[in-house]
Image: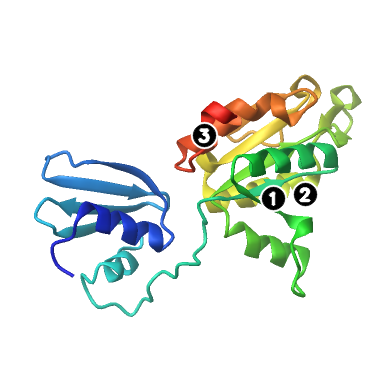
Amino acid sequence: MQGWELEDVRDTLQNNGLVITSEARMGNDKGTQFRCSGGEVINLYDSGKVVVQGKRQSEIKGLFGIEHSAAPKIPKATPHNPRKVFVVYGHDTDARDQLEAMLRRWGLDPLILDQLTSGGQTIIEKLESVQKEANFAVVLATPDDQGHRSEHPEELAYRARQNVVLELGMMLSVLGRERVAILLKGQEAMEKPSDIQGLLYIPFKENVDEAKLLLAKEIDAKGIPIDLKRV
């Protein structure tokens, strides 16, 4: 195909599962630049020419017929579905159910591990498979456990479950910290599950709905549209 149009490029990216995070005029004002959540950069010049930069160049070039590549085209059923949100939780099932209901009201598709079929997989295999489908993750850090440093009982504090900390780390490695939000219940008495700088913590006291506006804004800002007027 020659002489690509703006709408054609946008549709090609979205139909092949790429999430467009920005669409703006190029610095030299000679065309439009698309940036996608996986680090892909696509430049559409006003002449209709497409130039691919950033990550996965050979695959993206294949979508636009720029060059023949041994790499297969990205299937439409690709990882990082724009509306799928992975939910990490511990023992607080009430908070989990509140979060699930809230995400569904926003038109999102929450992925909750114990509601998904295992297909003969172990828990860790199931987690590795499912996490690749999500485009955002919400971690429920609830005060399920207690702990302190050895020989320092005066430091006793509530903590999230170990599985929550493990899955948080896996989500950070797959999605990046900008696409992971941690809902922290009772933050005054809680030890944060990680000392990594730049993580997004949203506190709430009793009901997850207390965090809904901040969470909705964060998800919407990452290119997953939510009608904030109805939150």
Q: Residue visible at 64% across and 40% down? A: 105
Residue farthest to the front, as pictured: 230
**Where does label 2 land, which residue?**
163
Check if mark 2's residue and mark 1's residue have beta carbons within 8 Å.
yes
x, y percent for residue 166: 71, 49
Count numbered badges in the picture: 3
Q: Identify the residue at image location x=42%, y=52%.
A: 19
Residue 114, percent across and down? Answer: 79, 57
| Image height of 206 relative to 199, above or below | above
- Helix, strand or loop status at disc 2: helix
Up-down: is 47 above or below 211? below
Q: Give the percent coordinates (x, y) of residue 38.
A: 42, 53
Which residue is identified by label 3? 227
Give the mark toward the camera: 3 or 1: 3
**How far apart in space, not on screen, are marks 2 and 3 (Cα)?**
32 Å
Q: Which quadrant holds the N terminus? A: bottom left
Would you place residue 105 above or below residue 9 in this image? above
Using the image, tell me which numbered label, if any, was put on residue 167: 1
**Could you tell me if residue 180 is visible in this image?**
yes
Q: Name which residue lies at 71% across and 46% down.
A: 88
Q: Residue furthest bottom?
A: 70
Left or right of 192 on screen, residue 179: left
Residue 213: x and y in percent read 60, 26
Structural distance between the alpha carbons of marks 2 and 1: 6 Å
Residue type, label 2: Asn
